[in-house]
Image: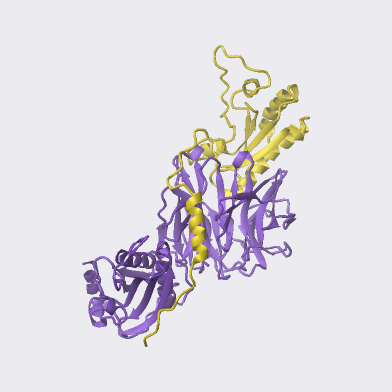
Chain colours: A yellow, B purple
Amino acid sequence: MKRNLLTVAAVAASLALTAGCAKKAPEQLPPPPETDTSTGADTGGDTSGGVGTTVLPGSRQDFLNAVGQGRDRIFFETDSYSVDDQDRAILDTQAAWLQRYPNVRVTIEGHADERGTREYNLALGDRRANAAKNYLASRGISASRMAVISWGKERPEALGSDESAWAQNRRAVTVIPQ
Amino acid sequence: MKFMKFAFLLAFASPAAAQLHVDVTAEGAEDMVVAVPVMPTDHPVDTVAGTTAALGRQVAEVVAGDLRGSGLFRPVGPSGVREIGYGEVTAPQFDYWGGNGANALVQGSVQAGADGQLTVGCYLYDVALKQELVRQGYVVGPRDWRRAAHKCADLIYSRLTGESPFFDSRIAYIAESGPKDKRVKRLAIMDSDGANHRFLTNGQSVVLSPRFSPDYKQIVYMSYLGNRPRIYVYDIGTGRQRVVTESVNQSFAPRFSPDGRWILYSMSVGGNTDIYRVSAQGGPSQRLTTSPGIDVGGSYSPDGTKIVFESDRSGKQQIYVMNADGSNQNRISFGGGAYATPEWSPRGDLIAFTRIAGNFRIGVMSPSGGGERLLTDSWQDEAPSWSPNGRVIQFFRTSQGRSGRSNVWQVDLTGTHERKIPTPLDGSDPAWGPILP
């Protein structure tokens, strides 16, 4: 029963692949980014202008001051993207400001709570952002000024795993450039 | 030492002379003791990966680790078991191993050739029957010694279970660090046992949902690079990447077809998400779903003729199957709660999914929707990915609360062998590739 060891095909392809990788990939963990440029511009609705600073008309700070604390965003029920009366009142205020500054372009960020699967939540966040966008458009804001982006559950505002945190995270935020 | 302990246990259990076989569908089957001594070398040679003598120990460690990780065997060694001589590799001392409680014996050898290549020999013996069951040799570059070890473990696993191999494969996933509201996510790859870990992106942009191409040359994934969430194909050999579809619309959830010719993806247009496919070479996209609900994700059947996907067109997320051209869409999940992230087994016989009913749990059902079984029970388990042989499922488990940390786990189809996969950082979105070419 003496057989020679069978020779399995050499793994040249995999060697090439491995060598290629080793060159491209860092040996050590890359340092964390100094500023996370991918986080979007969700500022959490901070409306403090700061003493002695001038707020530029048409700026993000001007928008936040004009719409009021926490009113750069609307919130949604679980799995829902419907806009209710309270949301419409908030979006009306946003629309009024946007009409004063017709050259300002905005991004509407859609978000979901953590109690959904990742990819479905990306689709749900897009629905929510578009619900806000469509209402603003119905108030006369040109759709071409409004971009949407969905973050799904990737960027929660509140960190807890409870209904109050989830309610804060199911949101569409209107973001003005800095 | 450890070995002797098992010897005592098995004095009662070991039956005479039945053919060694492990049933992967039986619960609690991990009572087969497999001895894995150090694999000797004919004479020690220095290689770029260490001496052949050192490699003989490392190969045996990887083999034993793979077998242990499957949950189906009780490997003992190479530490704590007797070292064998080179001449013994093909002439095992069955009485010794049998007397010490082993049911099966894995022996092997490591040699370096004049061309610098390693030859790893791998032999499996039935100790009670005093019989060789299977043997194989693997010729690899010294730096690829782990692949020879995984091949050896696959040989043993396949011979003892009758199942297809799965250890010699890789996993792409998302490495996670940082706080819940500013999570840093990097594309990363590793071997099926967590070795040879590499980061492919630096974490500047959020990246999600990677998938290997069937030939392992590319990874398709979604990135928020430049705040434009789109799908990219990353070429592992060159490190270059390209955008799959040019569109102002957000695209995500990419999947390769089994033949690598198509990329399935989801795209949101004006609030409505549908599933599309595009040639992996680029070109125009074809829309496969048109419902006003969210149609998302998707996974090809192994023969490429069908796609299982998720849709909330009925009101809640449910699982549907359609032909690869989008025709003939039929719902297959009807239980309470919601169903998400369906993934077709590479064997074709099962669909894995996330069941949302209170907790998020991983389950399987047949492609026609019957025979549902839940395999895990935790607060939030999500996004199953199949081992190449369709017998093990990886997924990620997220902890409840302000840390919200995620880790990669795996479970076998019995639901009893569940373990966390060791990764340097936290992890999510595991995607298991096929057996390496």
Q: Residue B289, relative to residue B16: is it above or below?
A: above
Residue B298 appears in the rendering:
no
- In percent of width and height, residue B431 lies at 53, 57
Question: What is the quadrant of residue B303 in the picture?
Answer: bottom right
Q: Is residue B117 left or right of residue B204?
A: left
Q: Is the N terminus of chain B in the top left, top right, bottom left or bottom right quadrant?
A: bottom left
Question: What is the quadrant of residue B62 in the picture?
Answer: bottom left
Q: Residue B243, relative to residue B10: is it above or below?
A: above
Q: Residue B382, relative to residue B387: is it above or below?
A: above
- In percent of width and height, residue A105 lies at 71, 30
Q: Point out the residue furthest to the front here.
A: B114
- In percent of width and height, residue B338 lies at 59, 55
Q: Point out the residue furthest to the top here.
A: A52
- In percent of width and height, residue B246 lies at 70, 47
Q: Point out the residue furthest to the bottom here.
A: A1
Q: Nearer the viewer, residue B197 or B349?
A: B197
Q: Nearer the viewer, residue B161 or B321?
A: B161
Residue at 62% across, 39% down = B227
Q: Is residue B225 left or right of residue A21?
A: right
Residue at 74% across, 32% down = A145
